Amino acid sequence: MRIAILLPVVAAAALAACGSSGDTGAETEATPFEFPPSLSPFGDGYPVAGDPCRQIGESEAVLDLLDDSAMLVGCPTVEQAEALGGSLVATIDGVSLVSVPMGDANAGMGETGDALVAGTDYNATTILSCAFDGAASFSDCNAGVKRNWGDDGTSLVEVSKPDGTTRAIFFNGTEATGADSAQADGSAAWDFKVERKGDESTVTFGPEKYIIPDALVVGG
């Protein structure tokens, strides 16, 4: 009688052990792709948040690949990089790097005007040099342009600030003419100044400073 009782118990224990091993394998998840810090990746995805590619900031690893008229984007695979429509320029630490033009003033022109960057309402996007609170050193800020934004042909450059807010700067051609302001944050009383050097404008608005290339504003 003891043998008849023990055998089912042993068999059940063996089946439970097998089932436990199978469940462990099913719970294993793929490790997400990690961009190496040496490439200075930033943002939550490109061209829209959640996408696998990311914009690449200035670093020693990519100095020879940077272009004022294009943005550098890194992707986990060559196929993802090619889908962005730019030029593949290198593969560094397993990341496929593609140079994406900010846009030509005549590229994609049709009855509706300039083509838009996928997933945005901008005609072109880039990374600008920016400074805040009167700082002497510059950092990087994401920016986009809406060309012919106003009825009079005015263009709008919108810069994403580190605190999550944005600053809009208005242009007539390549001439910066003003910025959005408000009484609430005191910016309505700030002075607006512009200095031209070569093909870029350095805009100083109160304690904020932005270096904006003509290529972003009008294309080229």
Image: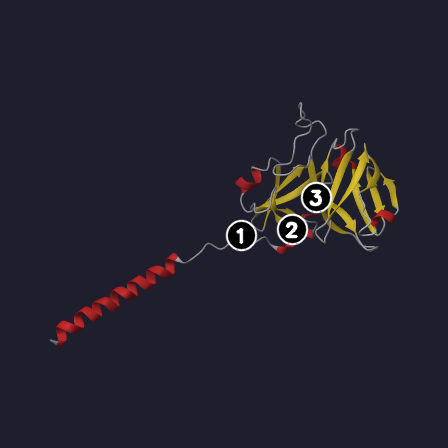
Q: Name the residue under label 1.
A: 33
Q: Earlier in the sequence, mark 1 or mark 3?
A: 1
Residue 137 located left or right of residue 162: right
Residue 89 placed where, x, y %?
63, 41
Residue type, label 2:
Phe
Residue 42 placed where, x, y %?
65, 51
Query: Count of labels shown?
Result: 3
Residue 48 numbered tag: none
In this rendering, the label closer to the viewer, 1 or 3 = 1
Kind of element beneath mark 2: strand
Residue 115 placed where, x, y %?
66, 30
| Circle 1 Cα neighbour tier, 10 Å, few/some/many (<14 / 14–19 / ≥20) | few
Residue nearer the viewer, 190 or 113: 190
Residue type, label 3:
Leu
The CA distance from mark 2 to mark 1 is 14 Å
Quadrant assignment for the C terminus: top right
Kind of element beneath mark 3: loop
Residue nearer the viewer, 186 or 166: 186
Would you place residue 87 above or below residue 1 in this image? above
The CA distance from mark 1 to mark 3 is 23 Å
Residue type, label 1:
Phe
Residue at 33% across, 64% down: 20
Residue at 83% across, 44% down: 203
Question: Is residue 48 among what the camera can see?
Answer: yes
Q: Name the residue under label 2.
A: 42
The CA distance from mark 2 to mark 3 is 15 Å
**Residue 177 sits in which quadrant?**
top right
Residue 66 numbered tag: 3
Residue nearer the viewer, 27 or 40: 27
Question: Is residue 190 among what the camera can see?
Answer: no
Residue 108 located left or right of residue 33: right
